[in-house]
Image (spheres, rainbow, N blue to C red):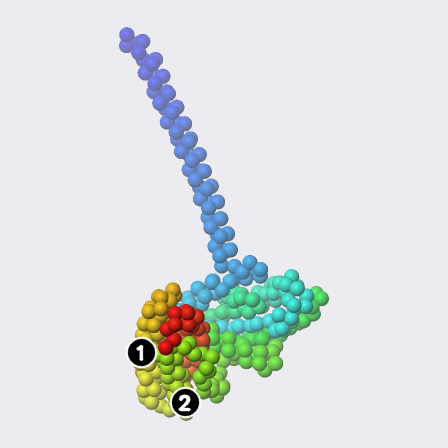
Amino acid sequence: MTSGMEPNYERMLLEEIEAKNQLIEQLRASEAGLLELSKELKLKNEALEKVAITDQLTGVYNRFYFEKRAQEEIERARRYGSPVSLVIYDLDFFKKINDQWGHGFGDEVLKRMASEVMKSIRATDLFARWGGEEFVVLMPGTDQRHAVMAAEKLRQRLGRVLHPTIGRVTASFGVAEHRYGEQLENWFTRADRAMYRSKSQGRNLVSEWQDQEFLTEATELAWNPEWSCGNAVIDGGHIQLLTLANSVMAVIQRDEDLTQISEVFDQLLSHVEKHFDEEEEVLRAIGYPSAAFHERFHQHLVMKGLQMKKRLSEGHVVKADMILFLVDEIIVGHLLTEDVKFFPWLQRSGAEG
């Protein structure tokens, strides 16, 4: 009886071994498939990442990636004290190109010019399209003087390019070196203002940021009746805001000592916080749908003002930066960009009084 059972037992063992071998082969095939799938997913992710950080027309980096890398360079500069500069350029009379020859020709100009810049910059530089015909070059390890020299080489190179049908196209440049503790927004604004100086002085130029020139150009802010929203509390707050901003600019331009500047700036900040509280109360009362966002915007401005106050007390603030904050953020950014959005709601609600 025993000998009769042995063949069955051996067959069962063989079948079990065969089944295990098949399972091993399946696992190996599955592992190979997973590995192949993993490689495919990695390639797709890399392609998606490239799309996410690349300007689709010119093939250079886009604004999103520039801002990310610029923040990293700001942190590196803060940590190690190394210089980093920003170059902005804008193609001259580009609207005329689109209007006269069409957007197809305009696109070709953008691509050709971007290609020329890519051939000229260092491997450590970052080149990106900011938007439209405006481009930026981030230059780590470079002070303003050397960035101006690099921008001048770019200006000359771009001006030599001969475009089919259109001919030569020039560009206007602005350059600014990052300052310790400075936010990206302020740094970009300084380079952008320098670029617009190139535009105003005839185009096809390189201009660098100069504090003294900006301080000299800064003029008193005058209330425009068109800025009125009709609410006495809010309008009164805005008028007082301009008065205090003018007081700060006046003591800066008279080159008063930091103690006096700090006293006037403190008065401005106190009024800003009071005005923001009053404005937010009115917006909540009329059911303004963007009231929460507006409050966060206010908080952001107050925080920046307090940071500037701290830097002022430590003797680190740059006077031109204070005027930029007052004009570009408190007046233009706050009053003329954000506040005007709720004016129609005030008028519809009848809460002007």
- Residue at which label 1 appears: 274
Q: Residue furthest top?
A: 1
| Residue 83 visible in the snapshot | no
Whether residue 260 is situated above or below residue 346 in the rendered picture: below
- Residue at which label 2 appears: 250
Q: Residue at x 61, y 81 (%)?
A: 202
| Residue 192 visible in the snapshot | yes
Q: Residue at x 35, y 23 (%)?
A: 16
Earlier sequence position, callout 1 versus callout 2: 2
Label 1 sits on what residue type? Answer: Lys
Q: Residue furthest left?
A: 2
Q: Percent position (x, y) of residue 15?
A: 37, 20
| 17 and 347: which is toward the camera | 347
- Splitting the image into 4 quarters, where does residue 281 fall? bottom left
Q: Residues within 10 Å of mark 2 (few under 14, many from 20)?
A: some
SS at circle 1 = helix
- In the image, is 160 to the left or to the right of 137? right
Whether residue 65 is situated above or below residue 326 in the rendered picture: above
SS at circle 2 = helix
Mark toward the viewer: 1 or 2: 1
- Splitting the image into 4 quarters, where does residue 170 fall? bottom right
Q: Percent position (x, y) of residue 113?
A: 61, 67
